[in-house]
Amino acid sequence: MWPIVIVLYVMLGGIFAARAAGALGVTALDSWPLAVRTGLALMFVFTGIAHFTRTRADLVRMVPPALPHPELLVTLTGIAELAGAIGLLIPPLARASAWALAAMLVAMFPANVYASRTAHTIGGRPHTPMIIRAPLQVLWIALLLWSAP
């Protein structure tokens, strides 16, 4: 299974768990946009933490050689994903966080193109083919912008 599919399952699980909590009376999760932001936040925590675990070296190798300081870029994007995830859950910050995360997904897309062309692996698994990765990037960006208040 490609790493990206695991991330998709994390997001979907978070969305449906949040919707279930909303249906059970948790007013902070009583709408689809709130549930989607919760699922996205969970996904970005999951991916942000990966920037600091055993997959870090794989993520550093994923940075195109034309970009300087790949380790710093991986650190900064990991921090940005974690901060954005938190921001999605704080109503006054949710819109700005959603837009910032969407911009980051666009900015990071060239690294995904590079990785898909170089037989790159993450955690020993092949990088997700672009025919799957590109639509998922569009989905995440659309969900971020749709769910932003």
Image (spheres, rainbow, N blue to C red):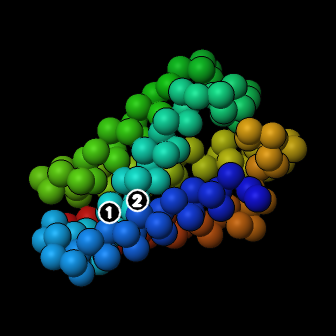
The residue wearing badge 1 is 37
Tell me how far mark 1 sits from mark 2, CA to CA: 5 Å
* Residue 56 percent coordinates (x, y): 63, 28
Q: Quadrant of the N terminus?
A: bottom right
In the current view of this chain or complex, which residue is farthest to the front?
24
The residue wearing badge 2 is 40
Number of numbered callouts drawn: 2
Residue at image x 72%, y 50%?
113
Q: Quadrant of residue 149?
A: bottom left
Residue at image x 53%, y 20%?
72
Say if residue 33 shows up in the picture: no
Element marked by disc 2:
helix
Q: Quadrant of residue 60?
A: top right
Three-letter amino acid code at disc 1? Arg
How many residues crowd mark 1 within 10 Å: few (<14), some (14–19), many (20+)?
many
Q: Is residue 21 left or right of residue 141?
A: left
Three-letter amino acid code at disc 2? Leu
Mark 2 and mark 1 in contact (Cβ < 8 Å)?
Answer: yes
Residue at image x 37%, y 69%?
17
Between residue 73 and residue 32, name the one nearer to us: 32
